[in-house]
Amino acid sequence: MSTSLPSIMICGHGSRDKGAVEEFNQLAVRIKERLPEHHVESGFLEFAQPIIRTGLDKLRDAGAKKIVCLPGMLFAAGHVKNDLPSEVNNYAAENKGLELIYAPDLGIDPGLLEASKQRIEEALEAAGDGVALADTLLLVVGRGTNDSDANSNVAKVTRMLWEGLQVGWAETAYSGVAFPLVDQALERVTKMGFKRIIVFPYFLFSGILVTRIYDWADAAEAANPGVEIIKASYLNDHPKVIDAFLGRMEDALNGTGAMNCQLCKYREQIIGHEHDQGAAQVGHHHHVQGIGTEDNAKDRGVHHGHGHHHDHAHGHSHGHGHDHGHDHGHGHGHSHGDAEA
């Protein structure tokens, strides 16, 4: 393992669900296997341990001179645009001799679309050939945020999968914050006359939210005996997911990776989010940083609601500041249940 090569820090969201944390850790192992010459560490923004700073400390203490920080999240909303850059910027300010490069989110990636297609086809194969694609509706479920740019990316994924799979119809829903929620969408699409509905969580990992999505699907099928509702798996550590992470690493090192500044509500006046323009890039997750999974939290007397749904809507009006990687200064507003590890 060479200290002359850039080190890699995989920055996860974190979850109070043990399974989600284990899946993220397994993905980190897969990335390490693909990068045997690099020093790779991983950590979490909130809930789980180790925290991101712990991983950065390990890389620094092992002699790293350059660290590429990979956001372990699909789209750029509050966590990717604000909380993670704040962590990276603060660490860089404290370690002047260390170069930190912040990579873009995974985004809409051809490999991730192919992985999604395979997950959906696996579910169709398991369900059997009794229903034609023309009689099948695809419901793609995204995380949901009050960042309309991130929400619109889920809708684009839906459209591309719709055309790629050639199902009869497709709709988009969200697990929280954005409309329609999964139960609302299912109530509508079960009335559209399709014989089969595929519910596909466009998530990297399991967790409370994916469980909730599947529970909604089961409830909808029970309430609509004439409609078959099947559940596709989330992305997890599909080989194409690993490819996408390595692609973002190369983008960061080559200087070609960039988030969508044109439609970023923190840079431009986006309809409905005008008050967010110019908000400060400050993290808001110190109160849940490293508190552990649900069992550990209970052991230590930490109490949260089932989904830990407090909707951040901080109306900061401070200036921009983001010297390391993506040139954004951000505040954020979002609900963070257990989105993804």
Image: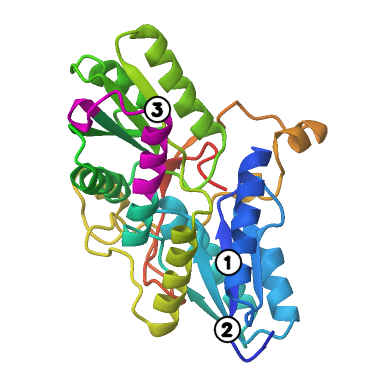
Residue 6: image tag: 2
Element under disc 3? helix
Res 161 → quadrant = top left
Asked if residue 119 is among those painted magenta in the image, a careful observer would answer yes
Residue 127: image tag: 3
Q: Nearer the viewer, mark 3 or mark 1?
A: 3
Q: Residue furthest bottom?
A: 4
**Left or right: 323 as drawn, with respect to 1:** left
Q: Residues within 10 Å of mark 2 (few under 14, many from 20)?
A: many
**Left or right: 90 as drawn, with respect to 170:** right
Element under disc 1? helix
The amino acid type found where label 2 is placed reads Pro
Q: Residue at x 49, y 54 (%)?
A: 238
**In front here: 159 or 306?**
159
Dot 1 or dot 2, earlier in sequence: 2
**In front here: 215 or 105?**
215
Q: Residue furthest right?
A: 299
The amino acid type found where label 3 is placed reads Ala
Q: Residue at x 31, y 60 (%)?
A: 110
Segment colored magenta: 116-136
* Whether residue 8 is situated above or below residue 315 in the rendered picture: below
Residue 31: image tag: 1
What percent of the width, then of the height, locates residue 301?
A: 79, 32
